[in-house]
Image (cartoon, rainbow, N blue to C red):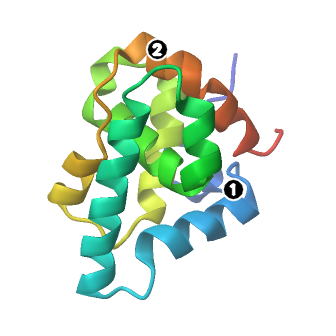
Amino acid sequence: MREAGPNPGQEGWREMLDRTFVSEIKKVANGDGSREHRFELINELYDVSKALGNRYEFDNCVKKYGRAKVALCVACTIIREKYRHETPQIMWAQAVMNLWTNRVERSISAATINIHPAILSDNSRFLRKVTTMAA
């Protein structure tokens, strides 16, 4: 019988994310915890999500905005459309979102990418692969 993996909210899944990626997400997403940082991040994530709406610009967006901001947008989109994605994608997205403690609903809405789930899945596969540690 197969052993079940950790639930997304448990520490076991967070350990599967790369340590440098975890610290990068915490630094970019939470910043100093101030209200000003939150609003600045909302505006930046809105720009990133608009740029990611073009299916051919994913790699350029990672280079231009950094993998943390792109990962936040991808995670927000996967969480908002859970029913369209596979379980490993959802678990990765929940692990990323658990690191973002300074968020509000508006920030999740601003970071959501307007793109077809199949295209998002294809484009984000490499990002998920390089941000998780090998089991």
What residue is shown with label 2?
119
> In the shown orientation, is residue 16 left or right of residue 61?
right
Q: Position of residue 19 (x, y in %)?
A: 74, 63
> In the shown orientation, is residue 14 left or right of residue 47?
right
Q: Position of residue 33 (x, y in %)?
A: 36, 85
In this rendering, the answer to whether 61 lies above or below 14 is above
> In the shown orientation, is residue 90 left or right of residue 116?
right
In this rendering, the answer to whether 69 lies above or below 7 is below
Q: Residues within 10 Å of mark 2 (few under 14, many from 20)?
A: few
Q: Amino acid at mark 2?
A: Ile
In this rendering, the answer to whether 35 lies above or below 90 is below
Residue sitting farthest toward the right: 134
Task: Look at the image and tell me whether residue 86 can be seen.
Answer: no
Circle 1 SS class: loop
In this rendering, the answer to whether 78 lies above or below 45 is above
What residue is shown with label 1?
15
Taking the spot 57% from the left edge, 28% from the top edge, the residue there is 124
Q: Which mark is residue 29?
A: none
Taking the spot 55% from the left edge, 64% from the top edge, the residue there is 25
